[in-house]
Amino acid sequence: MLPAAAVFYFPWEINSGVAREGESVRTFGRLTCYQPEESRATLSAQHASAQHQVAVQTMFVEPFDPVIGAQYTVLGEVENVEGVGLMVRARVLNCVDGVNLALLQKAINEQRSFFKERETKEAGRPSPADPT
Amino acid sequence: MLWGLDPVFSAFARLYIKDILHMTESIQVPGIYFYNSHPIYKVDVLGTVVYRREREDFFCYGVDDGTGVINCLCWKNELWKDQGDSGKSGGKHTDGAQGGFNLVTELKKLRQAQQSSCRLEIGELLRVRGPVKTSRQQREIMASTYYKVNDPVMAVQIAWMMEVPQLYRQCYDKPLQLQPAATGASAISSLSQATQIVRNFLKQKSVSKFRPYDVQGLLEPLVSGQTDGASTDKEPVAGPSSGQRVRQLLKEVLQILQDEGVVFRKVKSQDELYHVTEQDKDLLIAVKDVIREDSRREKYAEKGCHILHILSAVRQRYSPNVSKVALELVLKSLECNSDIVSTSSNHYTMF
């Protein structure tokens, strides 16, 4: 009944194949293009002097008020659409213009490094006695 | 099972939803869960609403924090129900107060504000606190508090994402350690325990005089008990022997008893002889004599003798080592026996 958890990904990771097809993801980017007739939007973000784009299928979140040039976050499932490639079918599309992107990236990395740290720690020690 | 001693137990734990879903439930006490052997029963989460269902008296929101999705049962406030009534009464009163502050309309606005903070749409941010429940094999949060979070530039979400890993590192992922606090307490309490043992012994046996080695035996079980505990982890360290530790403990105990005036040394010499203040008949007699004789003198006849006067007289007559607290104890016990009468807080006389 409940959808799967949408894990944070950086926009440049969506197309690089880190996120698998069917996976629930959330990412962010500047809205550069919206085609209402095709229910398709494009978010873009700059990383390491390259421009990365995320194609978004907006059918589920319409109608919405598109502000071209504003920062958005999107939450949805990765889909492989013929002729377009990987696309995020949005369940949530929020305008977050004014967000501190550097801090957001830091927070995502912070969370990831915490989970990585915990996994390595857990792998290294035997499972503790059951306290129940 | 000393769950209550774990501070996490009585707090709303800010766990990742993934961890809330995977915590093991206690078999003995359903409703209590364990994260890393920390007992947990209520949590605090922040996440995006990805699922919603409205019933007559509650909402069911699916909340996604990026690690997991959990159902949150959010009861509608009582205020929702009398919404119809308030509409009518509001209409009646509006013409009564013109322009100025109208309590009824303000109340209506407040109610609307509250409703809007409870009614969320998919994609909005929700903060929920409450106990974790498992119903029909599904884990959910019974919201005790919940509200919509306005977070237009994600500041709240970012702050949360930065804070939670720190909370994990500083408390949830650390095993509960009662040991250091407990040993610190026992170090203090062993002294007060020892003092109490000696005090009781002196009282029960009506001891009037003793030497340290007479009571040393009383404290040995305290110290030997400690060595057993400590020796397991401190074997190689050559600490003081238990005999030395008993003597050290006894020295501290005697100092406390002297400071309290319970015991005193009549003569300070090589021979460590302690007198028990209240059992020292000679001291009692000396104090009574001083008060009796001096109360007759014209100078003290009216008010009685001041405690400091008695002290200096007793020091001259009996022992220079009698302290003021010791004298106070003597005076108190004499007064209890109606041997003397206090005329003010610091003056004593005798009839």
Image (cartoon, rainbow, N blue to C red):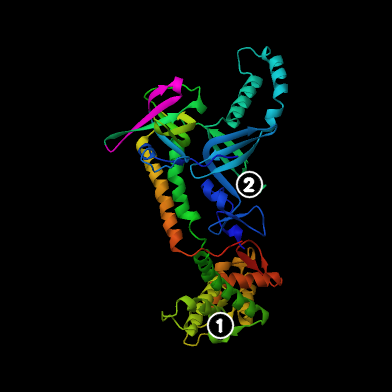
Q: Are marks 2 and 1 on the same chain?
A: yes
- Is residue B199 highlighted in magenta? no
Going by the picture, which residue comes out furthest to the front?
A82
Which residue matches tag 2? B138
Residue B323 image position (x, y, % from top left): 53, 73
Residue at image x 64%, y 19%? B105
Residue B265 image position (x, y, % from top left): 53, 80
Decide if residue B320 is in sight here. no
Residue at image x 34%, y 33%? A45
CA–CA distance in space, label 2 to label 1? 57 Å
Going by the picture, which residue comes out furthest to the left?
A49
Main SS of the magenta segment? strand
Left or right, A9 with reference to B342: left
Residue B223 image position (x, y, % from top left): 53, 79
Front label number (2 vs 1): 2
Residue B347 image position (x, y, % from top left): 61, 64
Near-viewer residue (B156 or B124) = B124
Label 1 marks a residue whose chain is: B
Quadrant of the frame with the C terminus of chain B: bottom right
Q: Quadrant of residue B121?
A: top right
- Is residue A42 highlighted in magenta? yes
Quadrant of the frame with the N terminus of chain B: bottom right
Q: Which residues are magenta?
A: A31-48
Q: Residues within 10 Å of mark 1 (few under 14, many from 20)?
A: some
Q: Residues within 10 Å of mark 2 (few under 14, many from 20)?
A: few
Disc ID at residue B229: none
Q: Say which amino acid is labelled 2.
A: Gln
Q: Say which amino acid is labelled 1.
A: Glu
Which residue matches tag 1? B220
Near-viewer residue (B108 or A44) = A44
Secondary structure beneath dot 1 equals: helix
Near-viewer residue (B327 or B62) = B62
